[in-house]
Image (cartoon, rainbow, N blue to C red):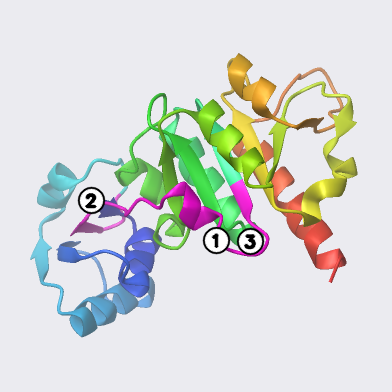
Amino acid sequence: MVEGRQAVRELLRARRRAVHRLLVAETAGEAGALAEILDLAGAAGVPVRRVGRDALLASAQTDAPQGVVAFAEPVPEAGLEDLLAGPAPFLVVLDGVTDPHNVGAVMRSALCAGATGIILGRHRAPSIGPVVTKAAAGAVEWLPVAIAAGVPSALSDLRAAGVWTVGLEAGAPTRLWDLAVATEPIAVVLGDEGHGLGRLTRQRCELLVGVPLVGPLGSLNVSAAAALSCFEVARRRAAAH
């Protein structure tokens, strides 16, 4: 299920997974993003049903579906080998990030910064359901997603394939701004807000870098840290060309 106008629009634009039907609130207008959604649905032959606001909210799993709910096949999983197929992979790995809003926000930032894929753990991670897809604002339709049985073992596989595994950790001696390997095949690894990187995950990272902070707080929200790190990689890659 996909909810929210931007998420549903990207679902229909990407055509990466089958969409079975749309529910649209009777009170929703037909201008802007919703007009585009209806046009895309019509072109793809997706049935559209107008329903009352209460019926729409009863079908939704988020607090604000913005007048549209789509019923679709699950997001397809990529294999780790698929994420390594390009000449210079730029991956994001999440270790124990369980808040679906954060996962979706990280995916959105990663895609916008040019990341070529994201790796999530099969355990201690939310499913890519309505909350993640809405928070990602459509990024799940374009960003390849691999699900790893274990994040530490996935990092070992990445290292064996020549990918730099770089963990974000508060207080690390190396600053994010000094990340010289950003132009190489790279995987940026982020841990949960409560405990950061897991012990084995930290051990499998070749480098640990931190964001210099000013003030009394000791850490950033994981989605903010992901945005900073992804765009620092993007900045360095752009400067190298």
Q: Position of residue 90 (x, y in %)?
A: 64, 54
Whether 221 is drawn above or below 24: the answer is: above
Q: Secondary structure at mark 2?
A: loop
Q: Nearer the viewer, mark 3 or mark 1?
A: 1
Name the foreground residue: 153 vs 175: 153
Left or right: residue 38 compared with residue 199: left
Residue on which disc 3 sits: 114
Image point (20%, 65%), residue name = 19
Q: Amino acid at mark 2?
A: Met
Quadrant in which residue 62 is drawn? top left
Quadrant in which residue 236 is drawn? bottom right
Left or right: residue 144 compared with residue 53: right
Q: Amino acid at mark 3?
A: Gly
Q: Tag 2: Cα neighbours inside 10 Å, few (<14), some, or many (≥20)?
A: many
Q: Earlier in the sequence, mark 3 or mark 1?
A: 1
Q: Amino acid at mark 1?
A: Ala
Give, as a single range, the part of the protein colored magenta: 65-91
In the orientation shown, which residue stands out farthest toward the front? 160
Q: Where, quadrant-wise, is the C terminus in this rendering? A: bottom right
Residue on which disc 2 sits: 1
Name the foreground residue: 192 vs 158: 158
Q: Earlier in the sequence, mark 2 or mark 1?
A: 2
Q: Tag 3: Cα neighbours inside 10 Å, few (<14), some, or many (≥20)?
A: some
Left or right: residue 206 compared with residue 74: right
